[in-house]
Image: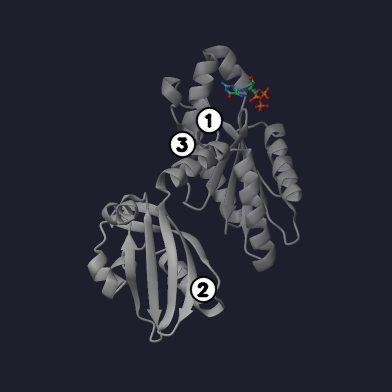
Amino acid sequence: MLDLADQLPGLIFQLHRSADGHLHFPLLMGSGIQLLDLDPQRLAENAEPALERLHDADYPGLMAAIERSARWGSPITLKFRFRLSADRCRWIAARAQPQRIETGVLWHGMMLDISEQVAEEERLRQLSDSDALTGLANRRKLLSRLEEEISLSNRHATPLSLMMIDLDHFKTINDTWGHLQGDATLRELADCCNALLREEDLLARLGGEEFALLLPLTSQRNAARLAERLRREIAEHDFDGLGSGRITVSIGITEHRVGDTLDHLIQRADASLYRAKHLGRNRVVAGD
Ligand SMILES: Nc1nc2c(ncn2[C@@H]2O[C@H](COP(=O)(O)OP(=O)(O)OP(=O)(O)O)[C@@H](O)[C@H]2O)c(=O)[nH]1
């Protein structure tokens, strides 16, 4: 029986919290002890050395779950990151059932290392959110971020701008230099734009030679300034030795207005882009 517990692919544990809030692990068994490099004897007296190794972002959630569980007698079900070293973490899933006892609360539970599963989920999420050619976000990802940002802007009346960026005469580029060169141009364009963006901006490829750029907390005025820099940068860039001035983009911009839906915003940005194309391309058109 003891052998089985030591070989378990994970951990079984008892966590005790005394009336003064002191936490310790009276029982800790399973192969996870080696994996996580835990010292059961130390932890039997004080859970602190284990708690200190939780990822900063997960610590408050875990402590809140313990508190809720102690108060309401509800089971703990959560996942968190456990630090192995400064830059290495394992994802752990924990389940535990509380029991009120004379000295406080005693949880009976288990933990499983779910790092591989979390990495696979992340890989699939990345795949379903990104455009295979450029590695940028795809339309699906853009629409879902737009929904979130519109809802924030509607609630807090914060600025939000949307840019549509379309390569000019891309058909000619494909026809002249071939489809592979066309693909390389799309990738280079993505890199060129990304180099000028902030972390919270989201550049997406909507399909073909059309891109969208979502700019949270950015007024139309500032978006127009950025658009002009992007336009100039691209027009002056030497795309894979084709020579500068070969590739240009037209850009349409709109700013969120309180009460806007996703469709409103996209339609107005599209209308601006259409005007930029109509006025002769290689230009920026903002708003109405
Ligand atoms: N290389 C490459 N070409 C693509 C891709 N997706 C769409 N295209 C091409 O993009 C071109 C788009 O042509 P149009 O819609 O006529 O637009 P345009 O030539 O850029 O003209 P304007 O937008 O009006 O300036 C077509 O030749 C498509 O075949 C892609 O993934 N790779």
Which residue appears at 47% of the width and 65% of the height? 96
Q: Amino acid at mark 2?
A: Ser
Q: Which residue sits furthest front?
A: 1
- The percent position of residue 272, horizontal first and vertical second, equals 70, 42
In the rendered image, residue 134, in percent from the top left (x then y), is placed at 51, 32
Residue 234: image location, x then y, percent: 50, 34
Q: Residues within 10 Å of mark 1 (few under 14, many from 20)?
A: few
Pointer 1 residue: 132
The span from disc 2 to disc 1 (Cα, nearest Å) is 44 Å
Identify the residue position indicated by label 3 in the image. Answer: 192
Circle 2 crowding by C-alpha within 10 Å: few under 14, some 14–19, many from 20: many
Judged from the image, the secondary structure of the residue bearing numbered disc 3 is helix
Q: Judging from the image, what secondary structure is the residue with disc 1 in?
A: loop
Q: Amino acid at mark 1?
A: Ala
- Quadrant for the N terminus, please: bottom left
Q: Position of residue 193 (x, y in %)?
A: 49, 39
**Count of all numbered marks drawn on residues in the image:** 3
Q: Is residue 285 left or right of residue 225?
A: right
Q: Residue at point 65% right, 68% down?
A: 156
* Disc 1 + disc 3, Cβ < 8 Å: no
Q: Foreground mark, 2 or 1? A: 2
Secondary structure beneath label 2? helix
Q: Give the label, 2 or 3, closer to the camera.
A: 2
Q: Amino acid at mark 3?
A: Cys
Which residue is label 2 attached to?
Answer: 69
Which of the 4 image quarters holds residue 49?
A: bottom left
Q: Residue at x 64, y 50 (%)?
A: 146
- Describe residue 28's horizontal placement relative to residue 157 as left or right: left
Residue 55 at least partly seen: no
Assess disc 3: are there few (<14), some (14-19) or many (≥20) residues with their C-alpha within 10 Å of its C-alpha. Answer: some
